[in-house]
Amino acid sequence: MTQDAQADRIVLKNLTKEAMEQAEAIADKRQIQAMTGYLEELQEDDEFWEFQANGLGILVTPESMKTYRLAYAVEEAAEVGNRFYLKPLMSALQPMSAYVLAISQKSVKLYEFTAAQELEPLDVSDLPADFSEVTKRTLQRDRAPAGSLQGDEGAEILQRQFLRAVEKAVRSVVSGSNMPLILATTQEFQAMYRSLNGYDMLADKGTDGSPQGLPEEEIRQAIPPIVRELRQERIQQGCDLYYQRQSESRAIADLAMIAKFATRGQVSHLLVEVDFVQYGTLSDTGEMTLSDTRSAETYDVINEIVIRVIENGGEVLGVLTEADAPKELMPMAAVLRWAN
């Protein structure tokens, strides 16, 4: 256990105490005990603390707890309320997830790379277990039976046969998703898979493997830089879409107006500066009243706007620094489904 991990445990202990004191205003004793139990168990989980990222987010209720290992640092804070404080986690909750397809001669696996930076295996019906299941050869370049194609030409035909079966099975799972698919395999297999691919969100960049495959932990460590690059590409696409929609009166960067449009379900895409905070209240019609301080009656209205956009099926992209998006679009910019 590193010194940083021990220090982070102490931070969590202190934040737990602070959060449960705040929770006394809205939760009963049984609920507070349940949430305290979840957090104390996490503090004592040596395996959890052995592998950490740059930041950690925790969403806890009396019924459940979810943790997010973050690729970026966040300020220490305990936020308590009737709704989750999602804004600092926005970059983890949406743009940082991806499918990962690991292919070797001996194994084929589809994973979801989660916001917690974990690889979760997915069950895919009809996914070939390995190269030999499809080709009836133990290795790509086994000696071919008499009368069969041989050498490099025969090997390529068998490879394409194998990858075609993999692509068909994987596409049945990922189709309709907006998550990118990242390949973890040899450069030869990557090029061949791309020529057969029918999924629009296949990432241009993959992680190079070997014919025998890569250890799962090695794949997990190779994915975050690729996902961060994909995230920045999505933010740039969001900025480009904003400027395209300006001529149609479907782009706006005024906070008060965005609050109203978000409440009506009119926002399709939202760019928001993660670190920006504005206290106040938001009515059921989207009317915003601002405040300089947080109190029992006020809260971060930026977070509330984010929640309303997500609830109405909009996409939210969290921007971490001014380098991610033009300053004129910060702290918030929206693309509308229809003109006002």
Image (spheres, grey):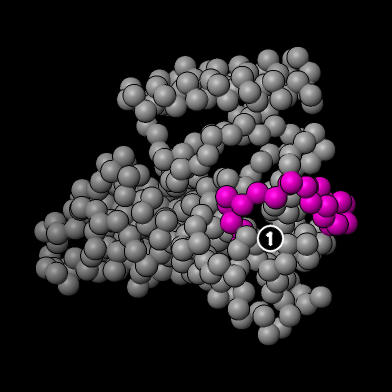
Mark 1 crowdedness (10 Å alpha carbons): few <14, some 14-19, many ≥20: many
Residue 297 appears in the rendering: yes
- Say what secondary structure mark 1 lies in: loop
Looking at the picture, tell me which residue is in the foreground, 78 or 217.
78
Q: Position of residue 46 (x, y in %)?
A: 40, 20
Q: Quadrant of residue 45?
A: top left
Image point 67% across, 21% down: which residue? 20
Q: Is residue 177 magenta?
A: no
* 336 versus 137 height, above or below: below
Which segment did they paint magenta? Answer: 270-292
Lateral position of residue 254 relative to residue 120, left or right: right
Image point 78% across, 62% down: which residue? 256
Q: Quadrant of residue 181?
A: bottom left
Image point 58% across, 45% down: which residue? 88
Q: Position of residue 36 (x, y in %)?
A: 63, 18
Q: Position of residue 204 (x, y in %)?
A: 37, 67
Lateral position of residue 266 relative to residue 155, left or right: right
Quarter of the picture holding the C terminus? bottom right
Q: Position of residue 2 (x, y in %)?
A: 32, 25
Q: Quadrant of residue 178?
A: bottom right
